[in-house]
Image (cartoon, rainbow, N blue to C red):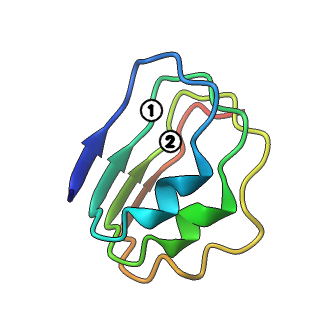
Amino acid sequence: LKYLSLGGNELKTIPGDIGLLSALEYLDFSSNKLTAIPSSIAHLGRLITLGLSDNPIRILPEKMDGLLSLQNLQLSRTS
């Protein structure tokens, strides 16, 4: 799985197992109700785009240094 778009689904949490999807290159969680991003997201070393816009995010992982391929981080309209 390389492309996963879950935007606009009123999600409140992201499962910690998201980090097991190591082939992901595009991940979109925009326009949900997320308040926290799990630290396991840092295991997505091939991820190029991470969409988190339009969420009331209050907690980001301390370390995201595993996102070696990340080029596009979308955080507009987050709390």
Q: Is residue 59 left or right of residue 47?
A: right
Q: Please state the horizontal and vertical placement of residue 71, each as a whole percent of the image.
A: 35, 70
Residue positioned 36% across, 79% down in the render: 69
Residue positioned 36% across, 70% down in the render: 22
Q: Please state the horizontal and vertical placement of residue 12, each as a whole percent of the image.
A: 63, 25
As helix, strand or loop, the secondary structure at mark 1 comes to loop
Residue positioned 35% across, 67% down in the render: 47
Examine the image and state in which quarter residue 13 appears.
top right
Picture layout, residue 44 above or below residue 36: below
Of 55 and 36, nearer the camera is 36
Circles 1, 2 touching at the beta carbon (< 8 Å): yes
Picture layout, residue 53 above or below residue 46: above
| Mark 2: amino acid | Leu
Of 68 and 79, nearer the camera is 68
Look at mark 2 in the image and give the residue it sits on.
52
- Is the N terminus in the top left, top right, bottom left or bottom right quadrant? bottom left
Look at mark 1 in the image and give the residue it sits on.
30
* Mark linked to residue 2: none
Q: Sequence order check: which comes first, mark 1 or mark 2? A: 1
Examine the image and state in which quarter residue 48 appears.
bottom left
Residue positioned 58% across, 44% down in the render: 15
